[in-house]
Image (cartoon, grey):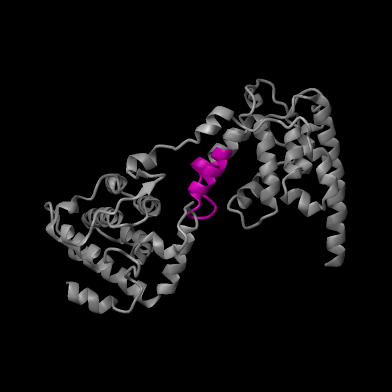
Amino acid sequence: MGEIIEVVQDNISRISLPYFAGVMAARFIMILDDPLHFMYAKINKFLNKAPCWDLTRMPSYWVDKILLQPPTDDDAYYQEVEWFQEALVDGLRTPRVSFSSKKPILLY
Amino acid sequence: MRALLNSAIEGTPVSKPEASFSSLRVLILTLHDSQGWLASDSVFEFLDNCLLRLIKRPVKYYDDFTDLASTIKSDVMRVEDYEIDLLLITIIEQWSFLVLSALPSTIENAVKWLSRYLDLSMHTGGHMILLLRIRDHIKNLTIDGESRLKLSKALGQPACYATSDELKGFVEPHRQTINDKPVTYASLNTPTFNEDWLVVGPPIEDEDHPALRNWIRKDVAGAIREGDIGELILYLCSDQQDIRIQALMSLKKFMSSLKVFYTRFCILE
């Protein structure tokens, strides 16, 4: 929660958070409430990586961690891919995909 | 062979009790010489090892099977209705040892046998999606590229054993359907789209923004579990500046409530 606030508070009046980041953050909140969720470990690792998020690198980070790295549970690969696919589709709510913008929204 | 296997597995959970076609018969059919393939001694040794383990600890493999079945979305109500042999679950466990210790010719022979076994399991009523999951598990454990390719082709075509006289006499080809359409491997590979979704598109932002008010009426845990905090975070993505600012203020207030809740929780502990 604190991390998403850190991400947006300096720029929220000027520009909206990209939907992909918002969707992922909303899903993180639900999963952190359930330590037995198959994505819990990877999300924990992501949140402990840094106090702020680099929004331009979020999609590639998760593509690497889910599609190109082994799953946390041995037989949960397809579940993780399905989870990520749903998040990607859910994040395409507007024609503007801000994480591809040249200037990162986040400044650490 | 039938008599020997019968005596070994009688009274054990190796056979699917609910199966429309005896799993023992399936196993024997796949071990027949056919189309130039001959089951090697190593395949029999591997099977012997798997069957022995399954007979000794059936509960463990039943648990593994239910865990695997729970990973797929299905309308099947009972685990038994998947019509999958527990022998396949044992094979998943033992396959990595076979791959590491056996000669390439043994692995090739075993892969051919396993492809036949999977094909015939599908043809005699095995749950297609679960069989695909099992096949992919085993394929991921296989190192040799050619063997992996052969396994990829398993379950991709109708069982060629339908022409065998023995099979014709005892089973009616089990037709699986999804939404009243016959299931084929191609249909499973083709993503099925909800056409209504394609027309409507992703969710539209609610103009009332109810989550700005709803979270206040709930306790910390309820606000998270019922999705109100998730909605607040999504309001940060809104095109309306005032909504974004209100959502940020709400999230900061919720953070304060969360800290108070956590402090009280620690004190009580």
Could you say which is closer to the camera, residue B256 or residue B17? B17
Residue B267 horizontal side relative to residue B13, left or right = right
Prevailing secondary structure of the magenta residues: helix
Residue B265 horizontal side relative to residue B3, left or right = right
Q: Specify the quadrant of the image occupied by residue B39.
A: bottom left
Residue A90 horizontal side relative to residue A75, left or right = right
At x 82%, y 32%, the residue is: A9
The x and y percentages for residue B28 are 20, 65
Q: In which quarter of the image is the N terminus of chain B?
A: bottom left
Could you say which is closer to the camera, residue B186 or residue A16? B186
At x 11%, y 52%, the residue is: B36
What residue occupies the far front of the structure in this picture? Answer: B180
The x and y percentages for residue A78 are 48, 47
Magenta stretch: give its range: A65-86
At x 53%, y 30%, the residue is: B198
The x and y percentages for residue A22 are 69, 35
Could you say which is closer to the camera, residue B76 or residue B25? B76
At x 47%, y 63%, the residue is: B66
Q: In which quarter of the image is the C terminus of chain B?
A: bottom right
